[in-house]
Amino acid sequence: MHKTLLSAALLAALTLAAAGTASARSPAVADGATPIATDGAPHRGHGRHGPPGDPVDALARLDTDGDGRISHAEAEAARQAGQARREARQAARQARDGEAARPSDPGARKPHGGPGGPHARGGRGIDLVADFAAIDRDGDGFLTRSELRRWHDAKRAERRAEGERRFDAMFREADLNGDGRLSRVEVDEKLPRLAARFAWLDENRDGTLSREELQAGRPQR
Protein backbone atom coordinates (compact mmCIF):
# COMPACT_ATOMS: atom_id res chain seq x y z
CA MET A 1 0.00 0.00 0.00
CA HIS A 2 2.82 2.40 0.89
CA LYS A 3 4.55 1.69 -2.42
CA THR A 4 1.38 2.43 -4.37
CA LEU A 5 0.75 5.64 -2.45
CA LEU A 6 4.34 6.80 -3.01
CA SER A 7 4.11 6.07 -6.71
CA ALA A 8 0.78 7.84 -7.02
CA ALA A 9 2.13 10.81 -5.07
CA LEU A 10 5.13 11.12 -7.39
CA LEU A 11 2.88 11.05 -10.44
CA ALA A 12 0.70 13.72 -8.83
CA ALA A 13 3.75 15.84 -8.07
CA LEU A 14 4.96 15.54 -11.64
CA THR A 15 1.52 16.55 -12.92
CA LEU A 16 1.30 19.47 -10.50
CA ALA A 17 4.74 20.72 -11.52
CA ALA A 18 3.60 20.65 -15.15
CA ALA A 19 0.27 22.34 -14.50
CA GLY A 20 1.65 25.88 -14.43
CA THR A 21 3.04 25.63 -17.95
CA ALA A 22 0.26 23.49 -19.36
CA SER A 23 -2.56 25.66 -18.01
CA ALA A 24 -1.40 28.63 -20.05
CA ARG A 25 -2.17 26.78 -23.27
CA SER A 26 -5.15 24.67 -22.18
CA PRO A 27 -8.44 25.67 -23.82
CA ALA A 28 -10.75 27.22 -21.25
CA VAL A 29 -13.89 26.10 -23.06
CA ALA A 30 -13.79 22.31 -22.87
CA ASP A 31 -15.85 20.47 -20.27
CA GLY A 32 -13.75 19.73 -17.20
CA ALA A 33 -10.76 21.71 -18.48
CA THR A 34 -11.35 25.28 -17.36
CA PRO A 35 -7.97 26.57 -16.03
CA ILE A 36 -9.66 29.58 -14.44
CA ALA A 37 -13.27 29.41 -13.36
CA THR A 38 -15.73 30.95 -10.96
CA ASP A 39 -16.82 27.54 -9.75
CA GLY A 40 -14.59 24.97 -11.37
CA ALA A 41 -17.00 24.50 -14.28
CA PRO A 42 -16.66 25.73 -17.86
CA HIS A 43 -18.72 28.77 -18.76
CA ARG A 44 -19.58 27.81 -22.29
CA GLY A 45 -22.47 29.89 -23.54
CA HIS A 46 -22.26 32.56 -20.83
CA GLY A 47 -21.12 35.87 -22.29
CA ARG A 48 -18.58 36.34 -25.09
CA HIS A 49 -15.60 34.24 -26.04
CA GLY A 50 -12.03 35.43 -25.66
CA PRO A 51 -9.17 34.34 -27.93
CA PRO A 52 -8.80 30.54 -27.91
CA GLY A 53 -6.08 29.00 -25.78
CA ASP A 54 -5.71 31.86 -23.29
CA PRO A 55 -7.38 31.07 -19.95
CA VAL A 56 -7.43 34.72 -18.88
CA ASP A 57 -8.83 36.13 -22.10
CA ALA A 58 -11.41 33.33 -22.13
CA LEU A 59 -12.96 35.05 -19.11
CA ALA A 60 -14.08 37.88 -21.39
CA ARG A 61 -17.24 35.82 -21.77
CA LEU A 62 -18.18 36.69 -18.19
CA ASP A 63 -18.22 40.41 -19.01
CA THR A 64 -21.87 40.34 -19.99
CA ASP A 65 -22.39 44.13 -19.96
CA GLY A 66 -19.38 44.72 -22.20
CA ASP A 67 -17.64 47.31 -20.03
CA GLY A 68 -14.29 45.50 -20.16
CA ARG A 69 -14.43 44.38 -16.53
CA ILE A 70 -15.96 41.56 -14.47
CA SER A 71 -18.12 42.63 -11.57
CA HIS A 72 -18.88 40.50 -8.54
CA ALA A 73 -22.45 40.14 -9.82
CA GLU A 74 -21.19 38.84 -13.18
CA ALA A 75 -18.87 36.36 -11.45
CA GLU A 76 -21.72 35.18 -9.23
CA ALA A 77 -24.05 34.85 -12.24
CA ALA A 78 -21.47 32.66 -13.96
CA ARG A 79 -21.16 30.51 -10.85
CA GLN A 80 -24.92 30.02 -10.69
CA ALA A 81 -25.06 29.22 -14.41
CA GLY A 82 -22.35 26.61 -13.94
CA GLN A 83 -24.19 25.10 -10.98
CA ALA A 84 -27.40 24.91 -13.02
CA ARG A 85 -25.57 23.12 -15.84
CA ARG A 86 -24.04 20.60 -13.45
CA GLU A 87 -27.42 19.87 -11.89
CA ALA A 88 -28.96 19.43 -15.34
CA ARG A 89 -26.21 17.01 -16.37
CA GLN A 90 -26.58 15.09 -13.12
CA ALA A 91 -30.36 14.82 -13.63
CA ALA A 92 -29.82 13.66 -17.21
CA ARG A 93 -27.40 10.97 -16.05
CA GLN A 94 -29.79 9.77 -13.39
CA ALA A 95 -32.66 9.66 -15.86
CA ARG A 96 -30.51 7.79 -18.38
CA ASP A 97 -29.37 5.26 -15.79
CA GLY A 98 -32.82 4.95 -14.29
CA GLU A 99 -31.56 5.80 -10.82
CA ALA A 100 -32.91 8.39 -8.40
CA ALA A 101 -30.57 10.26 -6.09
CA ARG A 102 -30.82 9.02 -2.53
CA PRO A 103 -29.06 11.34 0.00
CA SER A 104 -28.98 8.54 2.56
CA ASP A 105 -27.14 6.27 0.15
CA PRO A 106 -23.43 6.43 1.10
CA GLY A 107 -22.55 5.63 -2.50
CA ALA A 108 -24.51 8.56 -3.92
CA ARG A 109 -22.54 11.15 -5.85
CA LYS A 110 -21.83 14.50 -4.28
CA PRO A 111 -22.42 17.66 -6.33
CA HIS A 112 -19.29 18.77 -8.14
CA GLY A 113 -19.52 22.37 -7.02
CA GLY A 114 -19.92 24.05 -3.67
CA PRO A 115 -18.46 23.09 -0.31
CA GLY A 116 -17.13 19.57 -0.29
CA GLY A 117 -17.40 19.10 -4.04
CA PRO A 118 -14.24 17.88 -5.78
CA HIS A 119 -14.33 20.77 -8.24
CA ALA A 120 -15.27 23.52 -5.79
CA ARG A 121 -12.13 25.40 -6.79
CA GLY A 122 -11.59 23.78 -10.15
CA GLY A 123 -8.29 22.07 -9.28
CA ARG A 124 -5.94 24.28 -11.23
CA GLY A 125 -8.60 26.98 -11.44
CA ILE A 126 -9.37 30.19 -9.62
CA ASP A 127 -12.65 30.67 -7.82
CA LEU A 128 -13.47 34.22 -8.91
CA VAL A 129 -16.22 34.62 -6.35
CA ALA A 130 -14.21 33.38 -3.36
CA ASP A 131 -10.99 35.11 -4.50
CA PHE A 132 -12.63 38.27 -5.82
CA ALA A 133 -11.24 40.66 -3.20
CA ALA A 134 -7.72 39.24 -3.50
CA ILE A 135 -7.72 39.51 -7.30
CA ASP A 136 -9.21 43.04 -7.21
CA ARG A 137 -5.95 44.76 -6.26
CA ASP A 138 -7.24 48.32 -6.55
CA GLY A 139 -10.43 47.52 -4.63
CA ASP A 140 -12.75 49.15 -7.15
CA GLY A 141 -15.17 46.22 -7.19
CA PHE A 142 -14.22 45.02 -10.68
CA LEU A 143 -11.73 42.52 -12.10
CA THR A 144 -9.70 43.71 -15.05
CA ARG A 145 -7.66 41.70 -17.52
CA SER A 146 -4.37 42.80 -15.95
CA GLU A 147 -5.54 41.92 -12.42
CA LEU A 148 -6.65 38.48 -13.58
CA ARG A 149 -3.40 37.97 -15.47
CA ARG A 150 -1.34 38.88 -12.40
CA TRP A 151 -3.35 36.53 -10.18
CA HIS A 152 -3.22 33.69 -12.68
CA ASP A 153 0.54 33.97 -13.11
CA ALA A 154 1.08 34.06 -9.35
CA LYS A 155 -1.04 30.95 -8.84
CA ARG A 156 0.74 29.18 -11.68
CA ALA A 157 4.09 29.89 -10.00
CA GLU A 158 2.73 28.58 -6.70
CA ARG A 159 1.53 25.37 -8.34
CA ARG A 160 4.87 24.85 -10.03
CA ALA A 161 6.79 25.39 -6.78
CA GLU A 162 4.49 23.03 -4.89
CA GLY A 163 4.87 20.41 -7.61
CA GLU A 164 8.64 20.67 -7.45
CA ARG A 165 8.61 20.38 -3.66
CA ARG A 166 6.48 17.25 -3.77
CA PHE A 167 8.55 15.75 -6.57
CA ASP A 168 11.79 16.32 -4.61
CA ALA A 169 10.31 14.70 -1.51
CA MET A 170 9.10 11.65 -3.44
CA PHE A 171 12.40 11.32 -5.32
CA ARG A 172 14.43 11.42 -2.09
CA GLU A 173 12.24 8.77 -0.50
CA ALA A 174 12.59 6.48 -3.52
CA ASP A 175 16.37 7.04 -3.78
CA LEU A 176 17.28 4.42 -1.20
CA ASN A 177 21.08 4.69 -1.58
CA GLY A 178 21.09 8.47 -1.89
CA ASP A 179 23.08 8.59 -5.13
CA GLY A 180 20.70 11.01 -6.83
CA ARG A 181 19.44 8.44 -9.34
CA LEU A 182 16.78 5.72 -9.25
CA SER A 183 17.84 2.21 -10.16
CA ARG A 184 15.41 -0.36 -11.50
CA VAL A 185 15.41 -2.02 -8.07
CA GLU A 186 14.51 1.28 -6.38
CA VAL A 187 11.75 1.93 -8.87
CA ASP A 188 10.38 -1.61 -8.47
CA GLU A 189 10.50 -1.19 -4.70
CA LYS A 190 9.21 2.36 -4.29
CA LEU A 191 7.52 3.38 -7.54
CA PRO A 192 6.02 0.22 -9.03
CA ARG A 193 3.63 2.19 -11.23
CA LEU A 194 6.63 3.52 -13.14
CA ALA A 195 8.33 0.15 -13.47
CA ALA A 196 6.71 -0.75 -16.80
CA ARG A 197 7.99 2.52 -18.32
CA PHE A 198 11.49 2.33 -16.87
CA ALA A 199 13.26 1.63 -20.17
CA TRP A 200 11.20 4.29 -21.94
CA LEU A 201 12.11 6.94 -19.37
CA ASP A 202 15.78 5.90 -19.26
CA GLU A 203 16.74 7.85 -22.38
CA ASN A 204 20.50 7.60 -21.95
CA ARG A 205 20.23 3.84 -21.30
CA ASP A 206 22.44 3.91 -18.22
CA GLY A 207 20.11 1.70 -16.18
CA THR A 208 19.00 4.50 -13.85
CA LEU A 209 16.49 7.34 -13.89
CA SER A 210 17.68 10.87 -13.18
CA ARG A 211 15.50 13.71 -11.96
CA GLU A 212 15.68 15.25 -15.42
CA GLU A 213 14.53 12.05 -17.12
CA LEU A 214 11.58 11.71 -14.75
CA GLN A 215 10.58 15.35 -15.16
CA ALA A 216 10.84 15.10 -18.95
CA GLY A 217 8.39 12.20 -18.82
CA ARG A 218 5.85 13.95 -16.61
CA PRO A 219 2.21 14.01 -17.76
CA GLN A 220 1.29 17.06 -19.82
CA ARG A 221 -2.17 18.50 -19.07
Image: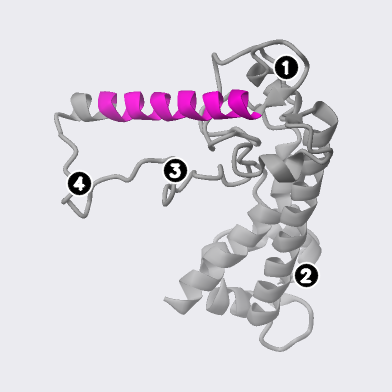
**Secondary structure under badge 3?**
loop
Residue 104 lies, in percent from the top left, at: 16, 51
Residue 94 in sight here: yes
Q: Residues within 10 Å of mark 1 (few under 14, many from 20)?
A: some
Residue holding disc 3: 114
Residue 146 lies, in percent from the top left, at: 85, 31
Report, in whole angstroms, how far the alpha carbon at label 1 lies from the one at label 4: 39 Å
Residue type at mark 2: give it.
Asp
Pick out the residue farthest to the bottom: 177
Residue holding disc 4: 103
| Image height of 126 relative to 208, above or below | above
Between 58 and 169, the one lying in front of the other is: 58
Asked if the magenta segment contains residue 156, the reply would be: no
Residue type at mark 3: give it.
Gly
Q: Residues within 10 Å of mark 3 (few under 14, many from 20)?
A: some
The dot on residue 50 is 1
Report, in whole angstroms, how far the alpha carbon at label 4 lies from the one at label 3: 16 Å
First along the sequence among labels 2 and 4: 4
Residue type at mark 4: give it.
Pro
Report, in whole angstroms, how far the alpha carbon at label 1 lies from the one at label 2: 47 Å
Q: Residues within 10 Å of mark 4 (few under 14, many from 20)?
A: few
The residues colored magenta run 72-92
**Secondary structure under badge 1?**
loop
First along the sequence among labels 4 and 3: 4
Residue holding disc 2: 206
Camera-side mark, 1 or 3 = 3
- Say whether marks 1 and 3 touch (CB < 8 Å): no
**Secondary structure under badge 4?**
loop
* Quadrant where the image shows the C terminus: top right
Report, in whole angstroms, how far the alpha carbon at label 1 lies from the one at label 3: 26 Å
- Say whether marks 4 and 3 touch (CB < 8 Å): no
